[in-house]
Amino acid sequence: MFNKFLEWLSDDNSVTVDFDNIDHVIVLETIQNWRRGSTKGGFIFGSGGPNWMVTEGDMEPAGVTYVFSITYKDGRQEIVRAESGTGGCARLLQKAYEADATAKEEITERKKAPILQKNQLPQGEYLIGKDIPPGIYDFHHVWGSGSLVLYSEPDDPPGWLEFQEFIDDNEFSGFKKDCLHVNCKDGWLLRVDGNLVVEIAEPQKIEIDLKVHADEEPPADEEPADDEPKAKRTDKAPALQKNQLPNGTYRIGKDIPPGIYDFHHVWGDGSLEIYSEPDDSSGFVEYSEFVDDGDFGTPDCIHVDCKEGWELRIEGNLIVEIAKPQAVQIDL
């Protein structure tokens, strides 16, 4: 029975541990125990002659009490106290050290650069049209941290900056793991800077359906209850849903029907811009707004007029949802 269960007394409570079914152990606390040493005596000489004096001994270490958190394979958890010098304590310490060593090995492996797979790009320069076919691509973080930068006119150094985004896998940094719908035109230069590996992939499909049947009203925006938890912020780009638009250029009348629309933040940050006369150089700015989740910009662009022939540009690492506008009601 000793191989499977061990019992010992701690604070007058019998503790039983099922060693065969332990998943992992964590040391929560170590408590140094003390005890008084043996009493001491001696003669003190004074004017009245020698006197015998008895003193208490000094404090000396008396072992350690460990507090363990034990998680079993079936999900059960328990807190156990064990005294140093016992067989059970030694076995629990061994399992705790093994778990710690395994965790360190996993961290070390994650820090190591992976073996490059197909369509994974390490730090370097890639000429569009030579190294990479022209097109629109998504880029996903694989390992490390650095910048994804895109230049037009690279033969005229340093060229014109068309796109730049810092990428890493630190969930606390606030940077993103994905760059969506990046337009890589023939002759442009893609640079992966820093200690970074990204994966280049075909872009997610964009589906726009803004038709509303005559007998239907656009769904009203529902306000979340005060006690409803907010959506968790994430640095990982979500899968595109219907009527969600990533970074890119959209021609009104071709890609999006003319009309008045509301735009709502989904992920990332960047600018939402509307240009008239887009074929005349850069066109004229009719609307421009920085969009994010509300930290610095706005999460919503309301009642934006998108006229035939105009151009909608979503710039930066941003996804917005295009929707029919809210009804305007005036009652004076």
Image (cartoon, grey):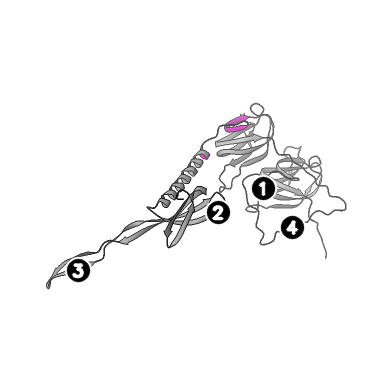
Q: Which residue is mark 3?
A: 53
Nearer-N-terminus badge (4/1): 4
Q: Report if the CB atoms under discs 4 and 1 are less than 8 Å apart.
A: no
Where is residue 232 shown, x and y percent of the image? 63, 52
Element type at mark 1:
strand
- The residue stretch that appears in magenta: 110-133
For marks 1 and 2, give the one nearer the viewer: 2
Q: Which residue is mark 4?
A: 222
Marks 4 and 1, how far apart in space?
Answer: 19 Å
Q: Quadrant of residue 308?
A: top right
Count of all numbered marks drawn on residues in the image: 4
Residue 267 disc label: 1
Q: Which residue is mark 2?
A: 76
- Kind of residue at disc 1: Trp
Q: Report if the CB atoms under discs 3 and 4 are less than 8 Å apart.
A: no
Element type at mark 4:
loop
Answer above or below: position of 76 versus 164.
below
Marks 4 and 2, how far apart in space?
Answer: 40 Å
Element type at mark 3:
strand
Marks 2 and 3, how far apart in space?
Answer: 57 Å
Q: Report if the CB atoms under discs 4 and 2 are less than 8 Å apart.
A: no
Residue that extends furthest to the right in the rendered view of this protein:
214
